[in-house]
């Protein structure tokens, strides 16, 4: 890289470009903007971004013969309602080897027909050092209230040209105008990736003449504009808004100077080579010789290859502690995995290395967690990957492993990892891996109750949790204790827990069982000579999770879901059945899911059985209406009541 810098001539002075409009100057807020009481394009909006402008430029510093990226940001936000005033609290994050400059921030209010500006003082900007070399600046706008406009601008300079700043054109509030401009000399070649569902008003990439040390060189200027962008609306069962909010991203592909060329992540082969040559990734996989005795001990206690692999996995689970940080790198000596809390990369690369040392076909798989967004399958962007797991082949069967969670069985990935595809990286190859898991989210509940004449239910309720639900509850018990979990049930309106028992919390992969003797007062109502009883004491779907008329992005349930409920209610003496809900059985196409509902009389009892399954994990937008109708029928059916009447 030093040669790269030495070849650069002096400094890049970006030339003017005819197609870019002049950015808005700071402080030019109008009375008309302050008098706005709503946003015409979306009168329900509680705030709107009136203006957002960003500019990234690659410059050369002759003082230390290095390049830098200078990023300028400017935004103006109008508030209509108290609910969005949290946006008046600003956080700016940047690497600790950079700094924020040219900072200005002000609140504007219209008072007695005059614009009153309240500036943010520099002494009110608080700086905090975070982990991994990140610095955070925080400030709040004074006098911000409904009707106010806030405006701020700043500049950040960073020494890395590998990544230009990504830019989001969309927010959870409407954006009236968003513009992003990028300028760089042709020494650099950047990949450009556009995500999202909006159509840009302007998307120009033009050649430009740039001055480098008094010499004219060729360069590129990108300009992107989006106008009247609607607010992004979150809905249940989506991965993260990062996957769907319209944005543009950049990553350095190559650098070329006279007599010098270097490729940066132009394809997955280059990513593979870079990672396998990295001392914190590929080179770490050969540094577990100190574990030979422990591996031999685990092998001697194993009956076959699979139990041997499970033994190594269990050893890493028990002897490592995850600190909650995501990483695809092992940033320290593997001996420290056994001595202190560490990141996910350390633990899972250590696991991979042990499996390889034990003779298994094991390799790391890099991925992006669900909250980090989906990876682009066509353009390799190394920065999209924030996590690593292990893949192992045993007896012609492939398993994906993550040892960070104490309660995750062999072959079951944490839900955070179930995000489309990951990329296997080995010495000789790289390829896509489907991030599928053996796990399911399963709940079974059975109960028998005596129903009194005044609508009180008294009886026994038993939960049986399996899969991800079980893992989560076991982890919760470890952290907070059994009593805290039982207290959550006592918080249900009308519930009184008379006794409780939890079993299976220390057994893997056994289910977690919760037994409750309970009195419930809010599921049945006595009115006159009749009792109205809700069939489902627990588990009722009270509202449709899908409310949008249409949906532009997939529905993602993460994993299969299965719920089974069986309840028996003893009819009070002197009462008989007056009306029962009709049975219902519906199914989604291609075995995507099913719902079975049945209520019937069994002698002196009324029983209710409900089975609910989601087998298809991801539903495309074209399947949304069918899924929405499926849940609509579930909500309507589960709301129907059992009616008992006094005998004549």
Image: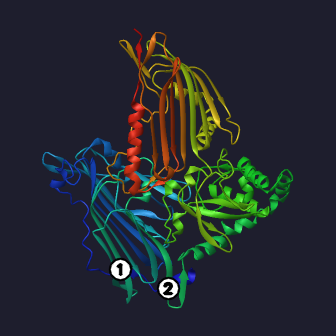
In the structure shown, which secondary structural element does the residue marked by tag 1 occupy?
Answer: loop
Q: In screen coordinates, is 196 left or right of 464?
A: left
Percent position of residue 531, x then y: 41, 17
Q: Who's the residue at 62% across and 73% down the image? A: 272
* Label 2 neighbour load within 10 Å: few <14, some 14-19, many 20+: some
Q: Who's the residue at 46% across and 19% down the image? A: 521
The residue that label 2 is drawn on is 256
In the structure shown, which secondary structural element does the residue marked by tag 2 occupy?
Answer: strand
Cα separation, mark 2 vs mark 1, equals: 18 Å
**Quarter of the figure that contains the N terminus:** bottom right
Q: In screen coordinates, is 124 left or right of 491?
A: left
Q: Nearer the viewer, residue 9 or 486?
A: 486
* Label 1 neighbour load within 10 Å: few <14, some 14-19, many 20+: many
Q: Quadrant of residue 483?
A: top right
Percent position of residue 623, x then y: 41, 54
In this rendering, is residue 410 above or below 464? Answer: below
Q: Who's the residue at 81% across and 63% down the image? A: 289
Tell me which colouring the rendered structure shows.
rainbow
Percent position of residue 328, x then y: 61, 61
Percent position of residue 549, x then y: 31, 49
Q: Who's the residue at 58% across and 53% down the image? A: 325
In terms of sequence position, does the residue under pointer 2 or pointer 1 come before the other? 1
Q: Nearer the viewer, residue 292 or 474?
A: 474
Q: Nearer the viewer, residue 184 or 317?
A: 317
The residue that label 1 is drawn on is 14
Is label 2 or label 1 in front? 2
**Quarter of the figure that contains the C terminus:** top left
């Amino acid at each position: 890289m030093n040669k790269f810098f030495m070849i650069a001539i002096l400094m890049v002075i970006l030339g003017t470009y005819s197609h870019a409009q002049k950015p808005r100057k700071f402080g030019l807020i109008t009375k008309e903007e302050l008098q706005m009481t709503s946003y015409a394009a979306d009168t329900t909006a509680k705030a709107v971004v009136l203006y957002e402008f960003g500019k990234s430029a690659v410059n050369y510093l002759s003082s230390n013969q290095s390049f830098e990226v200078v990023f300028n940001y400017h935004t103006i936000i109008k508030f209509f309602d108290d609910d969005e005033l949290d946006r008046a609290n600003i956080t700016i994050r940047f690497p600790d080897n950079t700094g924020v400059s040219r900072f200005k921030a002000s609140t504007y209010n219209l008072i007695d027909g005059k614009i009153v500006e309240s500036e943010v003082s520099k002494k009110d900007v608080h700086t905090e050092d975070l982990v991994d070399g990140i610095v955070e600046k925080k400030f709040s706008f004074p006098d911000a209230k409904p009707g106010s406009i806030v405006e701020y601008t700043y500049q950040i300079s960073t020494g890395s040209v590998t990544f230009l700043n990504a830019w989001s054109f969309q927010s959870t509030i409407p954006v009236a105008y968003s513009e992003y401009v990028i300028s760089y000399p042709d020494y650099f070649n950047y990949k450009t990736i556009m995500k999202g569902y909006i159509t840009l008003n302007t998307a120009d990439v033009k050649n430009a003449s740039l001055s480098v040390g008094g010499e004219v060189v060729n360069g590129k200027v990108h300009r992107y504009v989006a106008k009247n962008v609607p607010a992004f609306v979150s809905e249940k069962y989506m991965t993260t808004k990062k996957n769907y909010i319209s944005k543009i991203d950049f990553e350095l592909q190559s650098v070329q100077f006279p007599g010098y060329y270097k490729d940066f992540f132009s394809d997955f082969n280059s990513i593979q080579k870079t990672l396998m040559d990295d001392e914190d990734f590929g080179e770490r996989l050969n540094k577990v010789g100190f574990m030979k005795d422990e591996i031999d001990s685990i092998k001697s206690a194993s009956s076959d290859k699979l139990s041997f692999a499970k033994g190594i996995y269990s050893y890493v689970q028990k002897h490592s502690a995850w600190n909650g940080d995501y990483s695809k790198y092992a940033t320290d000596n593997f001996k420290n995995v056994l001595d202190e809390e560490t990141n996910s990369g350390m633990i899972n690369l250590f696991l991979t290395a042990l499996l390889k040392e034990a003779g298994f076909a094991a390799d790391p798989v890099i991925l992006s967690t669900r909250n980090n967004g989906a990876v682009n399958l066509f353009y390799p962007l190394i920065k999209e990957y924030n996590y690593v797991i292990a893949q192992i082949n045993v007896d012609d069967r492939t398993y994906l492993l993550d040892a960070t969670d104490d309660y995750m069985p062999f072959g079951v990935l944490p839900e955070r990892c179930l995000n489309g595809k990951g990329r296997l990286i080995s010495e000789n190859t790289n390829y896509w891996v489907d991030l599928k898991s053996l796990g399911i989210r399963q709940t079974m509940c059975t109960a028998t109750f005596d129903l009194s004449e005044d609508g009180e239910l008294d009886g026994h309720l038993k939960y049986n949790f399996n899969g991800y639900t079980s893992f989560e509850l076991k982890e919760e018990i470890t952290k907070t204790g059994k009593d805290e979990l039982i207290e959550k049930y006592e918080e249900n309106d009308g519930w009184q827990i008379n006794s409780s028992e939890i079993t299976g919390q220390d057994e893997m992969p056994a289910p977690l069982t919760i037994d409750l003797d309970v009195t419930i007062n809010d599921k049945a109502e006595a009115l006159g000579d009749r009792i109205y009883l809700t069939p489902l004491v627990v588990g009722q779907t009270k509202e449709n999770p899908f409310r949008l008329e249409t949906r532009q992005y997939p529905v993602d349930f993460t994993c299969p879901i299965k719920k089974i409920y069986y309840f028996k209610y003893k009819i009070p003496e002197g009462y008989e059945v007056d009306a029962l809900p009709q049975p219902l059985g519906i199914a989604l196409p291609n075995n995507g899911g099913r719902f079975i509902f049945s209520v019937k009389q069994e002698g002196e009892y009324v029983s209710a059985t409900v089975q609910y399954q989601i087998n298809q994990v991801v539903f495309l937008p074209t399947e949304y209406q069918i899924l929405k109708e499926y849940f609509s029928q579930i909500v309507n059916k589960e709301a129907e009541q059992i009616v008992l009447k006094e005998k004549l």
